[in-house]
Image (spheres, grey):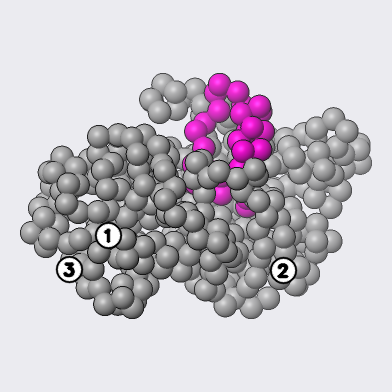
Amino acid sequence: MTDKTRHISRRSVLAGLAGGASIMALPGGIGTAGASNPFKMGTFFSLSGPASLFGPTQTACNALAVDEINAAGGILGRTVQIVAGDGGAPPAEAAKTAVRMMLRDKVDVIVGSHDSAVRQAIVGALKGRIPYVYTPLYEGGECAPNTYVPADTPQQQVRPSINVMHDSFGAKKIYLIGNGYVWPQQTNALAKRYIAEFGGSIVGEEYAPLGPGNKFDDAVTRIKNAKPDLVLITLVGGDNVNFNRTFAGFGLDKNIKRLSLLLEELTLQGIGPKNGNGLFSCMSYFSAVDTPANKAFKARYAKKFGEKAPPLSMIGVDAYSGTNCAASLINKAGSTDAKAVMAASEGLQYKTATGTGTMTNRHVAKDMYLAEAKGAEFKIIKSFGKIEHGEKCSV
């Protein structure tokens, strides 16, 4: 996607949402009483910072979900109204915004798709007083009270995909490269355990600071000298783009496979078709997922946003699922009372882009997909049915 296209998409989708503007009920959805007493949903999507590429898709998918929820009667019979915060802000700033949302704006629930540092700050700020639904893939282990995580976990992402890379491509010597924060480091700690299960070895491990300006020539030289069979990548956004371009530019893509754990359609566009040889990703959503539910979801999305629709990708579609999760959770509980919502979460079913999610231990078992980059798109080469999340959060 070009800078011009991205600008148009952001402007068209975010118009009227930023700053807490409401999304009104669709005709025939909710009566006057529901509209006059809106159910306020705070959102934290990536409107700035390194992950701002995902912001338009996150906001669009949230808007589609809210339209559908309002048409079906809203949450607790009330029209859903969005109060938008910036998930791309520094953690301390995001925490302050979350407190303002809760105390001043009186939001009833918060849905967020952002990095783990911001999640930890918001959890600390909310202290379980209102429900918080966290949607993007993450490192696992979030069991804070009144926090719900319909996100991909390392057990779902790494364990099945790394085993296929070993079984199908003979990958035993693994090099780990990621950004220097909680998600890559904790994910790699689990990856080492899964790699050891098939007798693999780690031949290198390094972390780059988050942000623009990272040059990966030295890192790629170290990888070349280590001679791994596979590079496991936990780099984010622009760093993932720069690394993979450099990797292919050095010619290492001819002999070394790559498995990236935060690689979806938007990042793949940045990497470019000529740099994707031997590059794989494992997530619970790709646009190429060939199911009736995903086809129907994409049709509804295209109908709502038309030619200016931001491209669909996992980091964005997760906001659709998370918004539906929040609505179903509170409607099942019959209130926003923390104890009632926690109890309602066990066995909760809610709509996703690819079907139905079922929550246990405040996480979700998922169908996962291993996909290979083919030009500017992904080809799904392996599907894994209902992989357990591995989390033990109590309710």
356, 244: nearer the viewer: 356
Residue 312 horizontal/vertical position (percent): 52, 37
Instruction: Name the residue rendered at 62%, 58% in the picture.
Output: 133
Between 177 and 172, which is closer to the camera in this rendering?
A: 172
- The residue drawn where x is 81% and y is 38% is 71
Label 3 vs 2, first from the N-terminus: 3
Measure the C-alpha gap from mark 2 to mark 1. Answer: 38 Å
Measured in 3D between alpha carbons, the distance from the residue under mark 1 to the one under mark 3, in whole angstroms, is: 17 Å
> In the image, what residue occupies the spot 51% across and 26% down?
9
Side of 361 where 72 appears, left or right:
right
- State which tag comes first along the sequence, 2 or 1: 1
The disc placed on residue 347 is 2
Residue at numbered disc 3: 203
Q: Quadrant of residue 171?
A: bottom left
Q: Main secondary structure of the magenta part?
A: helix
Residue 169, label in figure: 1
Q: Residue at x 38, y 51 (%)?
A: 281
Q: Which residues are magenta?
A: 294-322
Name the secondary structure under disc 2.
loop
Q: Indicate left or right for 380 with 95 as reference.
A: left
Of badges 2 and 1, the one in the foreground is 1
